[in-house]
Amino acid sequence: MKSKIVSITCFAIVTMMLLSACSGIAALSQSANSLDVAQAASSLTTISTPTDSTSAQSAASSSSSVAISPQASSIPGSDLLTAYQNTLEAIYAAVSPQVVNITVLLPASSTDFQNIPGFGNNNNNQTPQYSQALGSGFFWDMNGNIVTNNHVVDGATNIEVTLPDGSTYPAKVVGQDPYSDLAVINASIPADKIHPVTLADTNQLKVGEVAIAIGNPYGFEGSMSVGNVSGLGRELPSNQTDQTTGATYSIPEVIQTDASINPGNSGGVLVDINGQVIGVTAAIESNSGSNSGVGFAIPSEIVAMVVPALIKNGNYEHPYLGISGTDMTPDIAQAMNLPADTRGALVVTVTSGGPASNAGLQPSNNTATINGVQGTVGGDVITAIDGQPINSMSDIIAYLAIHTQVGQKVTLTILRNGQTQTVPVTLGSRPSQ
């Protein structure tokens, strides 16, 4: 049976997601020469070619010079494009001071350097003790707290923050949450250099809205790319697994964008047309390691819940149900003698001693072969939580993550042996890894 096994509050089908944060071994630097377009335009001269001396004299007397206006254009719609360009320039001017470059030192392994000339094939088989990686971050408050991705700073032995003006400050980790891939670091920075972000309400976000990524791809500080919100409600693997079931946790309600995101962007911001943060750029879907038009950002509604707890406690407690499951399909419904249009999440396993187990939820114990794949069926089918319809495991994951907290009592509506029942469950805290 081809099934999607999902853990508890957060699971995703494990596809190949490349965490895009770290630029890897070495930081890149660049210098750019700017061309002053107005100056170039003012240096242009106009050449006239009269056909005779009379016309030449007339031309000279009537017009000794011709003014060139670089702003003039007869292209239809150019006024709208100019307004759009001005808006982007204003957004960059407002947001770029809020974003910082993060450089970390990580313990190195020999595999980190095997493809780098001068490191992998040295005769004495010695490798550097540390490797350098890059990421992005943004100011959360005036106390010097900076938000980034957990995978940017996890395991770092040294962290430095570089501001847009080039000044650099040492930083330390304040809190980490690998389940949401968020972390907070702190640096002692003068108040006049701190510019906290403003979060947007992503509950109102729609596919097609403008999305602007600002960060430090490949170490190129203060880079901006523009695209759209290309998808909502995605799930992103967190690389954390349940120790009992082996299922993988995931981050729900992730924003998909076609704004260019590359290594070094992780921990940066994805903002809307008002310059407000809709997400933290975290990962890309890519076979090459660089942008392929599918990037992902952790939504601001999750950031708003997790970050204050990281600052206060150093960690965030995730609500825990204690099940793994899969989406109901017509084939599974048929194997369980249920109507083919039955929707919901089939409970596959129940963690012993967990909240679901204590509430009496039943796992799948019957064996069935579906599309040539053998699996287990027959467990409870969750069809609603607190009256909210559940059509998939993703719905359970999102509801628990966004709308509940540890110790809260929820009511599950289930199908058991074809009969509808309600089961109260008191949520626990996700076990530490």
Image (tube, grey):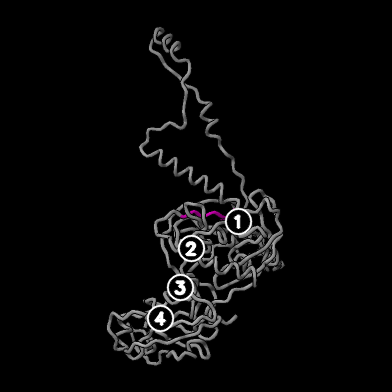
Would you name the residue on which mark 3 appears? 398
* Among numbered discs 3 and 4, the one appearing first in the sequence: 4
Q: Quadrant of the N terminus?
A: bottom left
Q: Quadrant of the C terminus?
A: bottom right
Which type of secondary structure does the marked residue at label 3 adopt?
helix
Would you name the residue on which mark 4 appears? 326
Is residue 295 shown above or below 333? above
* Among numbered discs 4 and 1, the one appearing first in the sequence: 1
Estimate the spatial distance between the alpha carbons at disc 4 and disc 1, rounded to whole Å. Answer: 41 Å
- Tell whether label 3 touches label 1 (CB within 8 Å): no
* Among numbered discs 2 and 3, the one appearing first in the sequence: 2
Q: Which residues are magenta?
A: 211-219
Q: Considering depth in this image, is 20 or 308 the residue closer to the camera?
A: 308
Residue 109 showing in the rendered view: no
- Tell whether label 3 touches label 2 (CB within 8 Å): no
Estimate the spatial distance between the alpha carbons at disc 3 and disc 4, rounded to whole Å. Answer: 15 Å
Quadrant in which residue 127 is drawn: bottom right
